[in-house]
Image (spheres, rainbow, N blue to C red):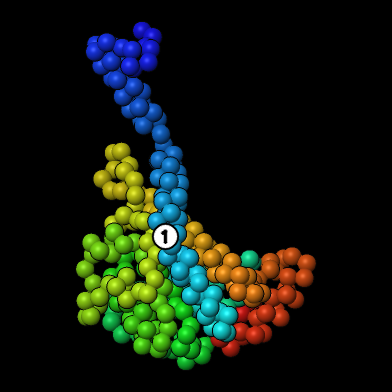
Amino acid sequence: MRMGPLSKLNSGQFREATHLRLRRKRAEFRLMSLADTFFEKSSSLQAKVYENNRQVLRDAGQHIAESLAAEGVLHTFGSGHSQILAAEIERRAGGLVPVSSIEDPSAGWPEQIEGYGARLFQRYAYQYLVQSGDIVLIISNSGRNASPIEVALEAKAAGLTVVVLTSLEMSKAASSRHCSGKKLYQLGDYIIDNGGVPGDAAIDAPGFPHKVGPTSTMSGALLLNLLNMEVIERLIAMGQTPPTYVSQNADGGAEHNEKLAQKYRHRIRRPI
């Protein structure tokens, strides 16, 4: 039976048309693979996190630009899997030179042990001449573990501005694993929300009891690169030449990078 516009149908035809559309929707859902579902979920999340964080990205970008213009450095820290994001904007073609990640040689295994994160920051600060007025960007999806919390506490005590990238929904639902009772977002001067759900995995897998498809890395990488763009744009507006890397594989890239790296070689972990 061919159905006309819903407004022209009688009540029986309207119900039939509605049920037909619902059956089609259910069939479409059943045909979607997990990859299709994850692609749709993560794609919509990317637009959502940019819109929701647009103002804080601008504000933090301005603050970071002012710090870099005054010879400051943007330090990054992530424990465990978040180390990937701490390195995402470090030493990248098209990215800023004065960005330095705080290395955790344990790859995050002791992140719940109090005292470990404080020592990491103290060692790094001594080694790379961390200064009051620098910025530290700390990434933790849950924001509950001791290491990122202690890095934030140590950084604030040293006069640094703290930018946090976390899942606010997950962090607010979790308890702190630090004696202060604080969670990471409570220590940030700027809070960037990756829009993730508690547990990070975002989609249901029919026939399987657990959610799958983590989103924190892809939304985190997007937000960090958006932050980079804000910093670069503001440096240009301030009349500064943004200190950015060129690909080492481009002609003249190595020479360009070496010249810039010399300026920061005692203050960043991986200058070239």
The kind of residue on which mark 1 rests is: Asn
Q: Nearer the viewer, residue 42 or 14?
A: 14
**Which quadrant does the C terminus fall into?**
bottom right
Q: Where's residue 100, x and y in %?
A: 53, 78
Q: Nearer the viewer, residue 236 or 173?
A: 236
Q: Which residue is mark 1?
A: 53
Residue that protrudes farthest toward the right in the picture: 251
When the figure is inspected, residue 207 is found, relative to residue 78, above or below; the finding is above
Q: Is residue 9 visible?
A: yes
Question: From the viewer's perspective, is 125 left or right of 257?
Answer: left
Q: Residue at x 33, y 42 (%)?
A: 205
**Which quadrant does the N terminus fall into?**
top left
Q: Residue at x 45, y 69 (%)?
A: 59
Q: Residue at x 46, y 70 (%)?
A: 60
Q: Where's residue 138, x and y in %?
A: 41, 73
Q: Residues within 10 Å of mark 1 (few under 14, many from 20)?
A: some
Residue that protrudes farthest toward the top in the picture: 1
Q: Nearer the viewer, residue 152 or 78?
A: 152
- Residue 241, quarter of the rendered image: bottom right
- Residue 120, quarter of the rendered image: bottom left
Question: From the viewer's perspective, is 28 left or right of 89?
Answer: left
Question: From the viewer's perspective, is 267 left or right of 149?
Answer: right
- Residue 121, quarter of the rendered image: bottom left
Q: How many marks?
A: 1
SS for dot 1: helix
Q: Is residue 106 visible?
A: no
When the figure is inspected, residue 18 is found, relative to residue 224, above or below; the finding is above
Q: Residue at x 51, y 90 (%)?
A: 129
Q: Where's residue 142, x and y in %?
A: 31, 65
